[in-house]
Amino acid sequence: MATVLISHSDCLKHITPENHPERVDRLISIMDSLKNFKDPDLVRLDAPEGSETDILRVHPIEYLDNLKQKSPVDGFVALDPDTFMSAGSLSAAMRGVGGITKAVDLVMNNQANNVFVVTRPPGHHAEKETSMGFCLFGNVSIAAKYALDHYKLPKVAIVDFDVHHGNGTQDILWSEKRSLFISSHQMPLYPGTGKENEIGIDNNILNIPLPPNTMGKDFRYLYENKVFPALEKFSPDLLLVSAGFDAHASDPLANINLAEEDFAWVTGRLCDLADKHCNGRLVSTLEGGYDLDALAKCVTTHLKTLLDRGRNV
């Protein structure tokens, strides 16, 4: 089996206003970095278009209809001060949904060891009824509900190491006892949620706030002593990862001091947990990361680690 990389050119059609951090150049930078990346165990696939059925697993029909109505023919529509739609945004977001559900299909049907979904816009800030933080659909939450309901998995875990709290994932999965959502994030920082006392309906949410200027060694300590023990205790059947790379020291939107090596380390350790509990099944999806050079390097490191670990399953 192989590691699969899923993306789609439609994600280049989600255009944001000039100087917006979540811009087309993010994906261009990643794809330029991976253009000449060759490995016999890497399979590249186009993301299919997501289905409304899967979107409606986590968002009400009124929310989806509202996005369709607001989708512009040209120019931009501001959904909030940070979140915009252009003519191609809905199509791009649908590729994110289709990409991550396809990724679940691949690992569940033993067609891949692990999968990395590289689409935009990101998803972890989108709440059940509210688009925000550059996000339209809760991609990783959709994947979790799809795996739980379609494949009847007993338990799914989500680990989010984006520097911003995954408030949307938390909102959507707050009452989902079959899931465990773990988020490490800088605090104080947008969106202001993610306190340690936000634990879900059944202790199914674990928030790990990081103070500004947290270093890699501190990040690793917290993962070794909080994240990994929680995953061990939960023993998931599938591990999903919200892979944001904006905790890198160079990122302009935050103040956490991680390096590429820290992202390689956390990716490898999450693969350890997936090997032990999930038969290696791990699906990662791109969230944030706004320094183009750091983003490209971290994504490449993340993918290389998934490849190396996937070969050993």
Image: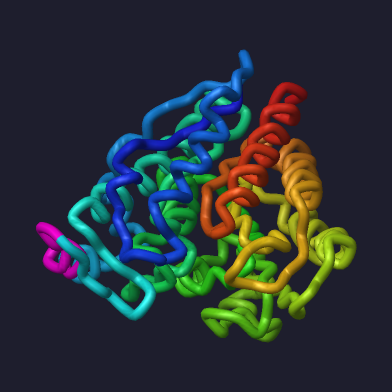
Residue 47's image quarter? top left
Looking at the image, residue 36 lies above or below residue 168: above
Side of 50 where 209 appears, left or right: right
* Closest to the observer, 86 or 7: 86
Q: How is the image coloured?
A: rainbow
Q: Position of residue 44 (x, y in %)?
A: 48, 25
Q: Quadrant of the C terminus?
A: top right
* Closest to the observer, 292 or 95: 292
Q: Report the span colored magenta.
A: 66-74
Looking at the image, residue 77 lies above or below residue 49: below
Residue 127's image quarter? bottom left
Q: Residue at x 89, y 62 (%)?
A: 217
Q: Is residue 140 visible?
A: yes
Looking at the image, residue 59 lies above or below residue 307: below
Q: Is residue 1 visible?
A: no
Side of 194 where 220 appears, left or right: right
Is-magenta flag for residue 32?
no
* Closest to the observer, 148 or 229: 229
Q: How many marks?
A: 0
Q: Residue at x 69, y 32 (%)?
A: 304
Q: Quadrant of the N terminus?
A: top right
Is-magenta flag for residue 71?
yes
Side of 257 where 185 appears, left or right: left
Q: Residue at x 46, y 64 (%)?
A: 21
Q: Position of residue 67 (x, y in %)?
A: 21, 65
* Closest to the observer, 13 or 240: 13
Q: Position of residue 312 (x, y in %)?
A: 77, 24
Q: Residue at x 75, y 48 (%)?
A: 260
